[in-house]
Amino acid sequence: MINQNKIKLISSLNKKKYREQHQLFIAEGEKLVLDLINSKLNISEVFIRDNWNGNKIIPTGITTTHTTEQYLKKISQLKTAPPIIALCSMPKKNLADINFSNDLCIALDDIQDPGNLGTIIRLADWFGIKNIVCSQNTVDVYNPKVIQATMGAIARVNIHYTDIEELLIEQQKQQVPIYGTFLDGEDIYSNKLSPSGIIVMGNEGKGISPAIEQYVDSKLLIPSFSTNLDKSESLNVSTATAITLSEFKRRI
Amino acid sequence: MINQNKIKLISSLNKKKYREQHQLFIAEGEKLVLDLINSKLNISEVFIRDNWNGNKIIPTGITTTHTTEQYLKKISQLKTAPPIIALCSMPKKNLADINFSNDLCIALDDIQDPGNLGTIIRLADWFGIKNIVCSQNTVDVYNPKVIQATMGAIARVNIHYTDIEELLIEQQKQQVPIYGTFLDGEDIYSNKLSPSGIIVMGNEGKGISPAIEQYVDSKLLIPSFSTNLDKSESLNVSTATAITLSEFKRRI
């Protein structure tokens, strides 16, 4: 059974403040929880519905609490409570472990939408990017909506939060190339791209902020092929990230 | 003033059945409505908040009804009612107008998520794709969530609904190349891609259905660069579409 204190704790984890305090977050649904169980993430406890016949897939050694649908509804952040919810420990990550001179990394400048952050983490996973560095104002990666949108990729990509301006200053001194996409940049398809460095992606509405833009040495443009005269198109940050990572990686 | 019958009509447009019956849909918010006003779409009427100071941007010739915030809330599909909502006529489109032998088109096989369809329309706009053909089970393009997600691109891309299996049979007879992305396809980066043809993108969970797969002559793979052994990654359909269109267009 699940007790009232545990329900209170888990419900509190929809707020960043309490996630930070307890260093815990939740993941919901069979596919996602199984992905996390089979990863190097530390699962503190899983809660499963009493009569759920999927319980055999949970390995021994994972603390498992059976509960009713009613209680799962209380702790779920989804519209329909899934039969399995996991309480997970936040992984420890150290910015100093990233070798910017050898690896390709993404820096996010104030991404606000949880779906976009989740999709970018999935893209990083697909393209073999091990680290994403987020500005302090980027949406919290342990927000339940972000966790759901990563589809398990959260277990395979390290997400760091820091002052990205300071980071860029420091890495520029080390001759690490810094890229970003802009509407007045140079054609990404013909521009020279290095196998390592930092790719900055900007906020949904404002793009890359002027404070950050000054450290970008290579401004890249994803060219439009539109023939509309009344065009006012833009790409969203997830699809721009997809195209940018595809271009960097296909040429290695 | 806005009368009760008009409120009832507009509220009914959150259902596909009534949108089809009246051949009308709604668009909300300043940026989106202005984009549509400045396009070839036919705007039936705009509703604006009495004290809104943005009303000067609406060109003469557009039927404009002033109303209160309270009434805008009644007709809005958004959490927070914007100061401007437009009632728009569905554009007439004819599948027979598409020249599949000369143009690159997208065919969508049962896309379910309104955000994905909206994003794919934005991508089509960016990459100069004039037509998207959707299966009958694809989410309705005039669903308010799709319209919002297109960010105005809805005015510049023609969206058709048809039996895409029949379409593919017919176009294959005409030697129109048919492409699709699959996890067991051939590397998109090294595969030959033609400047015209049909690119099929599949459902979020199931991918391209077997009934449709049999007509795809070129199965393409977007390769993963992940080095994780416990990988179970996939790309979502919007980001896969972004990378696929980028590859087709950059080589023209």
Image: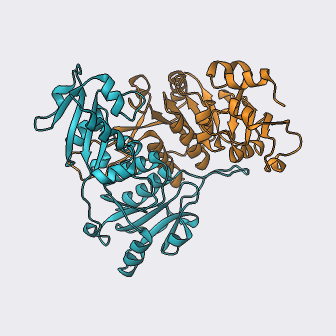
Chain colours: A orange, B cyan
Closest to the observer: A233 or B69?
B69
Closest to the observer: A213 or B201?
B201
Image coords of residue B75 (percent x, y): 33, 34
Image coords of residue B176 (percent x, y): 37, 75
Vertical side of A56 occupied by B171: above or below: below
Closest to the observer: B250 or B167?
B167
Which of the image's four quarters has the N terminus of chain B? top left
Which of the image's four quarters has the C terminus of chain B? bottom left
Q: Residue at x 75, y 43 (%)?
A: A39
In the displayed structure image, the side of residue A94 where residue A1 appears, left or right: right
Instruction: Check the image and name the residue furthest to the front.
Output: B4
Q: Residue at x 81, y 25 (%)?
A: A3
Instruction: Check the image and name the residue furthest to the left.
Output: B60
Vertical side of B99 occupied by A59: above or below: above
Q: Residue at x 26, y 41 (%)?
A: B87
Q: Quadrant of residue A37?
A: top right
Instruction: Check the image and name the residue furthest to the right.
Output: A60
Q: Residue at x 60, y 52 (%)?
A: B234
Vertical side of B145 occupied by A16: above or below: above
Q: Is residue A124 visible?
A: yes
Q: Quadrant of residue B173?
A: bottom left
Image coords of residue A220 (percent x, y): 39, 41
Q: Is residue A191 visible?
A: no
Closest to the observer: B108 or A126?
B108
